[in-house]
Image (cartoon, rainbow, N blue to C red):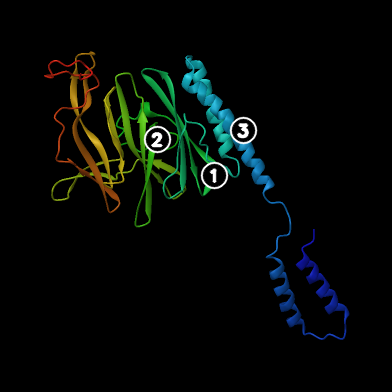
Amino acid sequence: MLNPMLSLSANLIAVYTTNLQIHVRPIMLTIFLLIVHLYAGSFPIGIPSDDHTVAIQAELGELEDSIAVAADLLQNSELVQERRKASARIEQLLGQALRMPGSWDYPFDRIPQISVLRPEDGTIRLFTWQLYLDPDHYRHHGFIQLRMQPDNPIRLQDRSDEYIRPETTVGHPDHWLGAVYYNIHACEYKRNRYWLLFGFDGLEASSKRKVVDVLTIDREGNPVFGSPVFQYQDPEGKVMKEKQRLVLDYATGSHVRLNYDDHYKMILFDHLMPFADDRNGLGLVNIPDGTYEGFRFEKGIWVHIEKVFDQVMETAPVDFPVLDDRKGKNIFGK
């Protein structure tokens, strides 16, 4: 239906062009008609603008349902071939979904097997998941979605086996230290922005891994993993050592913390000590000793703190019951 104000505008044009008794200078006529058209633009014309968006959201929902089916197989299938196919199916469908217009605003929140993280600044989004092959082998997959190019997702390729020194190696999307990310923290100093990625890797039967990787975007808009923002300083503030990322390998069954703490405004993690695991024949493994280390943000870098708290636990955490000297009590403490 024609906008009534546009109809009025057309009638006014007719009046001014046919009635010779009305004399208005051309410049005044132009200004008058411009005002009429601007005013008419504030009225809805009646063109349906949401149908296309609704259709895209419905298609994204169908793709998410298909991804959820594959993710269930990824988690629960007992056959490694089926798990491989499921992971490849997830990669195909998720890549297809992320290339669609409007995918940036779609939450993808119905697939618990896939970690979906967006930082506080809302500039990027990460999708990561884990493929279990056998007790000693895991593979990771994922995508990065950038707000400035939301329909051009960047595929991540796990090359963890090629990281001989993971704390000093710079990576890229096709050479990624794979992990399932469980937290992301945005950092900025003097307009230099990067993100801390807190991740977990099943690694192998005897040990697990937690990592804090550093994600930056270079001048060409390409993601880069690793940056020397973790510094170890002497008491005078002289830099003794730098790391591109933090990596904690620890014994399976140990409870190790590694995360950003909003209360203390720092990265907190368990201090690990070597332990001879003769019980399982694993040799030396790392376990937490009850103390905590940290990193505090200072002028764009993270400075190491050797001991965060003064209190120390009497014994290091263990993964099996210990009765020690509690006479007359069973393993439940009764």
Q: Is residue 124 left or right of residue 106?
A: left
Tell which tag, 2 or 3, sits nearer the viewer: 3
Type of amino acid at the residue the image marks with label 2:
Tyr
First along the sequence among labels 2 and 3: 3
For disc 2, the neighbor class at 10 Å (few under 14, some 14 to 19, many from 20) is: many
Q: CA distance from mark 2 to mark 1?
A: 19 Å
Vertical arrangement, residue 7 with respect to residue 165, above or below = below
Dividing the picture into quadrants, the one containing residue 268 is top left
In the rendered image, which residue does mark 2 sit on? 181
In the rendered image, which residue does mark 3 sit on? 62
Vertical arrangement, residue 76 with respect to residue 195, above or below = above
For disc 3, the neighbor class at 10 Å (few under 14, some 14 to 19, many from 20) is: few
Q: Position of residue 181 (x, y in %)?
A: 40, 35
Identify the residue shown where x is 13% and y is 30%. 314
Dividing the picture into quadrants, the one containing residue 67 is top right
Tell which tag, 1 or 3, sits nearer the viewer: 3
In the rendered image, which residue does mark 1 sit on? 104
